[in-house]
Image: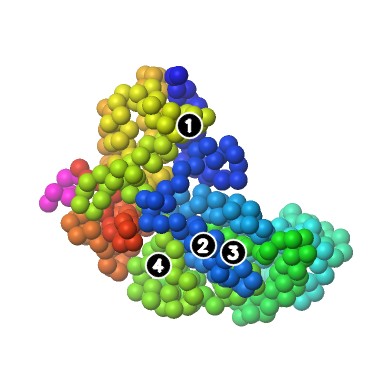
């Protein structure tokens, strides 16, 4: 059986997130938990289903961008739904301007997604929430032209029929208040600032209205339908920029530490993705004190041990991940027997796995470029992969300064990092990876950098 390299290429898109609930996507899914330090998704699930099913919970989930968090969260969603929970999953980057986020933005985004998901439930009109949002709209209407804000949100059961836009005659809907006004605010920093100036001091009132008039009655209706509760998974909140607010506070610390009380006040189960850099912030101790659970970290897939020897279990799983995209309908053992149908040698595939450092998206990006260059040759060759890696290394090293090279050499030698801001940047830019081996964390540089002459100084 020969491989269809064009189909292989299409199945390798690093921008695609696997949906565990989709049988087709599940063909490509590989469980990396044995080489990631444990069953993290199982821990998140049990916190909700076993230990605290009847009371609100809040968990933080982090890891390098592109390491597979979204795929794992969609697996969590599917497993929670199988346990009888109503689960709302959304990517917060669709609602928020990640360079400028305030707590009111996050609360409104969650309220919007809850209202969308629960539109068919018979709950009473949320009068307090409607009134607060109406006051907000009236204030903004006096300063900004909102007549063209198309809202597109469904009406809430129990509310009179509503229109889909605000106009100068004062037409207002709850859908307007928690709907696509956030899309316009994303594009207008002045509107965004005014919105937060008004709602920021009223966040306690806003949360009380969301809980009492939306979440609590919704959960009651869900339980009448046999559901066990409501879970909201907020993905991509780890992509909040690390820049400082205008009063000097780093934005990530402001949202996850200073506003921790409000992130946890929803009367349902919450899972947020958190920037990995916060684990290395000076204020990380304060963060752990403000949440009842330690943040769960999804490390890299381990491709080697701390002594530099291969981690064979991790290598096997990465080989499976690649070959599943080439032969999704074959059993695992049959796939591995087809390596020589795709690659000039099995060592070429192993080299790809090692140089990726166990970062799933980076591996797929390298593989995608490799397929593009070798598609007409019938097989993927080691020489082409080495050319792809050299090009990637060249791009990565252009922005690394002398201080960062010094820090990278320290990581390479010591396998650890400190809370230095320089290390935080290296982790954020995926120049340094975190691994977990039998419960112990260690760090190493991105293997693509290994042959850089700057590391030999």
- Residue 49 badge: 3
Left or right: 449, with 436 as reference point: left
- Residue 44 badge: 2
> Which residue is outermost to the right?
160
Q: Nearer the viewer, residue 347 or 454?
A: 347
- Mark 4, residue position: 278
Determine contact: label 2, label 4, CB under 8 Å: no
Left or right: 344, with 246 as reference point: left
Against 235, residue 141 (above or below) is below
For the record, the magenta segment spans: 452-457
Determine contact: label 3, label 1, CB under 8 Å: no
Q: Residue at x 34, y 74 (%)?
A: 282
Label 1 to label 2, Cα distance in Å?
A: 29 Å
Q: Residue 93's spot in the image, x, y percent?
A: 55, 56
Determine contact: label 3, label 2, CB under 8 Å: no
Mark earlier in primary sequence (3, 1):
3
Within 10 Å of disc 2 (Cα), the crowding (few <14, some 14-19, many 20+) is some
Label 3 to label 2, Cα distance in Å?
A: 9 Å
């Amino acid at each position: 059986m020969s491989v269809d390299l064009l189909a292989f290429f299409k199945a390798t898109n690093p921008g695609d997130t696997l949906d565990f609930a989709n049988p087709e996507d599940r063909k490509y899914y590989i469980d990396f938990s044995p080489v990631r330090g444990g069953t993290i998704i199982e821990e998140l699930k049990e916190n909700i289903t076993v230990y605290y099913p009847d009371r609100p919970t809040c968990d933080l989930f982090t890891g390098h961008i592109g390491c597979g968090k979204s795929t794992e969260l969609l697996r969590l969603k599917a497993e929670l739904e199988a346990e009888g929970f109503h689960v709302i999953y959304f990517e917060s980057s669709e609602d928020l301007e990640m360079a400028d986020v305030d707590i009111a933005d996050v609360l409104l985004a969650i309220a919007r997604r809850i209202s969308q998901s629960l539109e068919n439930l018979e709950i009473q009109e949320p009068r307090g929430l409607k009134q607060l949002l109406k006051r907000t709209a009236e204030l903004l209407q006096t300063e900004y032209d909102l007549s063209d804000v198309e809202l597109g949100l469904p009406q809430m059961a129990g509310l009179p029929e509503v229109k889909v836009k605000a106009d100068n005659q004062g037409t207002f809907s709850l859908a307007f208040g928690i709907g696509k006004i956030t899309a316009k605010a994303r594009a207008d920093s002045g509107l965004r600032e005014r919105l937060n100036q008004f709602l920021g001091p009223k966040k306690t009132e806003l949360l009380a209205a969301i809980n009492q008039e939306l979440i609590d009655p919704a959960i009651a209706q869900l339980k009448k339908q046999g559901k066990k509760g409501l879970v909201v998974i907020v993905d991509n909140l780890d992509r909040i920029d690390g820049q400082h607010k205008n009063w000097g506070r780093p934005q990530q610390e402001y949202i996850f530490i200073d506003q921790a009380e409000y992130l946890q006040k929803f009367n349902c189960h919450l899972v947020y993705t958190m920037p990995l850099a916060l684990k290395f912030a000076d204020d990380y101790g304060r963060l752990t004190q403000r949440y009842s659970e330690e943040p769960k970290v999804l490390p890299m897939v381990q491709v080697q041990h701390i002594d530099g020897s291969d981690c064979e279990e991790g290598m096997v799983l990465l080989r499976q991940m690649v070959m599943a995209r080439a032969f999704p309908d074959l059993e695992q053992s049959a796939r591995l027997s087809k390596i020589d149908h795709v690659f000039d040698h099995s060592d070429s595939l192993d080299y790809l796995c090692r140089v990726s450092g166990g970062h799933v998206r980076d591996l797929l990006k390298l593989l995608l470029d490799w397929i593009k260059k070798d598609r007409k040759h019938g097989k993927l060759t080691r020489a082409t992969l080495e050319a792809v890696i050299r090009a990637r290394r060249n791009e990565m090293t252009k922005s690394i300064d002398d201080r960062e090279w010094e820090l990278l050499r320290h990581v390479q030698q010591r396998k650890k990092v400190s809370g230095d801001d320089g290390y935080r940047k290296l982790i954020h830019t995926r120049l340094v990876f975190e691994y977990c081996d039998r419960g112990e964390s260690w760090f190493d540089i991105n293997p693509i950098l290994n042959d850089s002459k700057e590391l030999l100084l």
